Amino acid sequence: MSKEDLIKGLNEDLAAELGTVIRYTYQSSQAVGFVGFELREILKDEITDELGHAAFLMDVIVDLGGEPTTTPATFDKPAGLKAMLELDLEMEKHDVEHYQAHAALAEELGLVELKMKLEEMAADEAGHARELRRLVKGL
Ligand SMILES: [Fe+2]
Ligand SMILES: [Fe+2]
């Protein structure tokens, strides 16, 4: 595994983060009623977290000598809050896996700060997944 593999992987993570910011902003516009109100509150906090992740990834990619993507990953728009939340839960779980994999790659390359930060981000996504799981359970 090389630095180029890591840059490629982090750019995929960055595209996913940018897509998540747009997905959560879109979903907030769709969230109505009491459950929608709670969802909007949760998504507001998560959008802030995902933007922070995206900004960090951009800085790291530049530091590694790469060019950060500005193209967000595309996403599905299922109808209904429950289907939206189930999609979000799946995507957060994927994000956890990707950050864990890229943390291992960073460790292989001796990038200890990056490894720890990516593990922290995996933990953030796992926390998002827990919030979403609680919401899905109540629907
Ligand atoms: Fe994130
Ligand atoms: Fe997340």
Image: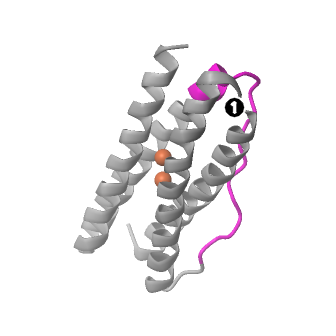
Q: Residue 17, percent across and down?
A: 56, 56
Q: Quadrant of residue 40?
A: top right
Q: Is residue 7 visible?
A: no
| Range of magenta residues | 68-86
**Total numbered badges shown on the rendered structure:** 1
Q: Main secondary structure of the magenta part?
A: loop
Q: Residue 113, percent across and down?
A: 25, 72
Q: Quadrant of residue 34?
A: top right
Residue 116 shown left or right of residue 76 in the figure: left
Amino acid tagged 1? Ala
Q: Which residue sits at x=74%, y=40%? A: 29
Looking at the picture, tell me which residue is in the foreground, 6 or 68. Answer: 68
Q: Residue 95, percent across and down?
A: 47, 46
Looking at the picture, tell me which residue is in the foreground, 75 or 49. Answer: 49
The quadrant the C terminus occupies is top right
Q: Which residue sits at x=59%, y=23%? A: 35
In the image, residue 107 above or below residue 29? below
Q: Which residue is mark 1?
A: 31
Magenta span has 85? yes
Q: Residue 80, percent across and down?
A: 72, 21
Q: Is residue 81 visible?
A: yes
What sort of colour scheme is used for the picture?
Answer: one colour
Magenta span has 112? no
Looking at the picture, tell me which residue is in the foreground, 76 or 7. Answer: 76
- Mark 1 crowdedness (10 Å alpha carbons): few <14, some 14-19, many ≥20: some
Q: Which residue sits at x=56%, y=62%? A: 14
- Label 1 CB sits under 8 Å from any ligand 2 atom: no
In the image, residue 111 above or below residue 48? below
In the image, residue 91 above or below residue 121? above
Q: Secondary structure at mark 1?
A: loop
